Amino acid sequence: MLFNPRNDTLPYMVDYISQFAVEFLHAADISCRVDLPENVPNGEVSPEVRHNLYLVVKEALNNIARHAQAREVRLTVVTTADHVEIVIQDNGRGFESGLHNASADGLHNMRQRMAEIGGRFQLESQPGTGTKVAFFYSWPAPKEK
């Protein structure tokens, strides 16, 4: 289960998020390409960070399924000992980010969730070219003694 403290590791989170994305998009009849690191550092991930990263990925996938009219999504995860980057890119219809659109609340929620954990949210979209969202989270530096 996602919220079991024994699962507070980076490898578990990466596996869970990628499996969720594939299953969710398959159910929506959208092809999913996954690009995961060969070796994921065995770092700890707090329940709060893990929960928020899962929810922003879920929101991004919901937006794609409901609004993008995409045929394919690419999920890319990059990990190092000090950060994780999750990128979700679709080949859907895209949108002008300045316009009010049906997924604006979801975009606001993703930005807010990432800010709450000290992470960053990035959005790129243009009509006819699809949308790319990226979530960046750096592990806090160890406290000096």
Image (tube, helix red, strand yellow):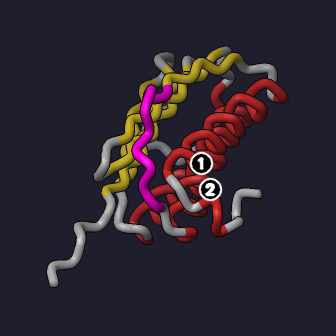
Looking at this view, is 60 or 129 the one in front? 60
Q: Is residue 123 above or below residue 47?
A: above
Tell me where residue 48 sits by quadrant. bottom right
**Total numbered labels:** 2
Rendered location of residue 136, percent (x, y): 36, 49
> Horizontal placement of 142 versus 89: left or right?
left
- Can residue 136 be seen here? The reply is yes
Tell me, yes or no, whether the two marked residues, 2 and 1, touch with CB atoms within 8 Å.
no
Residue picked out by circle 2: 55
Helix, strand or loop at label 1? It is: helix
Q: Is residue 111 above or below residue 14?
A: below
Q: Residue at x 58, y 44 (%)?
A: 101
The image quadrant where one finds the C terminus is bottom left
Identify the disc placed on residue 133: none
Near mark 1 (Cα within 10 A), the count class, few <14, some 14-19 or many ≥20, is: some
Mark 2 → mark 1, Cα distance in angstroms: 15 Å
> Horizontal placement of 104 versus 61: left or right?
left
Q: Residue at x 50, y 17 (%)?
A: 128
Looking at this view, is 73 or 138 the one in front? 138
Q: Residue at x 77, y 57 (%)?
A: 1
The reply to whether the magenta stretch includes residue 60 is no
The reply to whether the magenta stretch includes residue 39 is yes
Residue range corresponding to the magenta coloring: 36-44
Helix, strand or loop at label 2? It is: helix
Residue picked out by circle 1: 12
For badge 1, the amino acid type reads: Tyr
Rendered location of residue 143, percent (x, y): 21, 77
> Horizontal placement of 130 versus 61: left or right?
left
**Seen from this angle, which residue lies furthest right?**
27
Looking at this view, is 46 or 90 the one in front? 46
